[in-house]
Image (tube, helix red, strand yellow):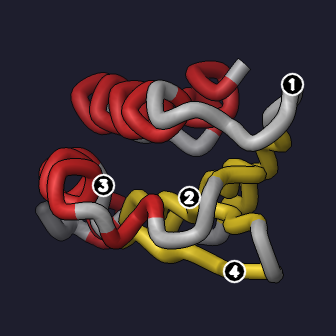
Amino acid sequence: MLGGIAARFELPLDRVDDLLLAVDSVLLQGALGDTVRLETAASPTELRVRLGSFRPGLADEAGVRRVLARLVDEVHEERAGEEATVELVVSATYRAGGA
C-alpha cells in the first residue's frame, strides 16, 4: 500500500525503497498493541508517513536514529502519555530540479 502511495507521489524508485526500509525499521521495534496505525500526507514538497503507537523515546534511540537518518529526510516523534507516533518525512526537492 505504501509503495502505491509513494508511486502516486512520483518518488524515484530508490526513495520509495528507502521509505519502505525506514517503515520496516520502525515496525521491527514493536508496536504497543496488536495493530499499527499508518497515515500518509503529501504536499508538493514532501511525503509524510505517520506510524503509531510505539513506546516513547523510540525515535531518539541511537541505533534507530542512525538507521532512519540514512533513509529519510526527517524523523519526528509525537508523544502522548505512554504512547508515541513516529513521523517519517521524505522531501520532494527533485520536483523543483533539486537533488
Q: Sequence order check: which comes first, mark 2 or mark 1?
A: 1
Kindly identify the residue that appears in the image at 84 percent across and 35 percent down.
Answer: 33
Amino acid identity at mark 2: Leu
Amino acid identity at mark 1: Asp
Task: Classify mark 3: helix, strand or loop.
Answer: loop
* Location of the C terminus (image quadrant): bottom left
* Location of the N terminus (image quadrant): top right
- Residue designated by label 2: 47
- Image quadrant in which you'd find residue 35: top right
- Image quadrant in which you'd find residue 27: top right
Where 83 sits versus 17, above or below?
below
User: Mark 2 or 1, which is nearer the eye?
Assistant: 1
Residues at marks 3 and 2, CA–CA distance in whole angstroms: 10 Å
Residues at marks 4 and 1, CA–CA distance in whole angstroms: 19 Å
Kindly identify the residue that appears in the image at 57 percent across and 64 percent down.
Answer: 87
- Residue designated by label 4: 79
The one nearer the camera, 72 or 59, is: 59
Q: Sequence order check: which comes first, mark 3 or mark 2?
A: 2
Q: Position of 33 compared to 19: left or right?
A: right
Where 35 sits versus 63, above or below?
above
Q: Position of 84 compared to 19: left or right?
A: right
Percent of width and height locating residue 98:
17, 69
Amino acid identity at mark 4: Arg
Tell me the number on the disc at residue 72.
3
Task: Classify mark 1: helix, strand or loop.
Answer: loop
Tell me the number on the disc at residue 34.
1
Q: Sequence order check: which comes first, mark 4 or mark 1?
A: 1
Q: Sequence order check: which comes first, mark 3 or mark 1?
A: 1
Crowd class of label 2 (few under 14; some 14 to 19; many from 20; radius 10 Å): some
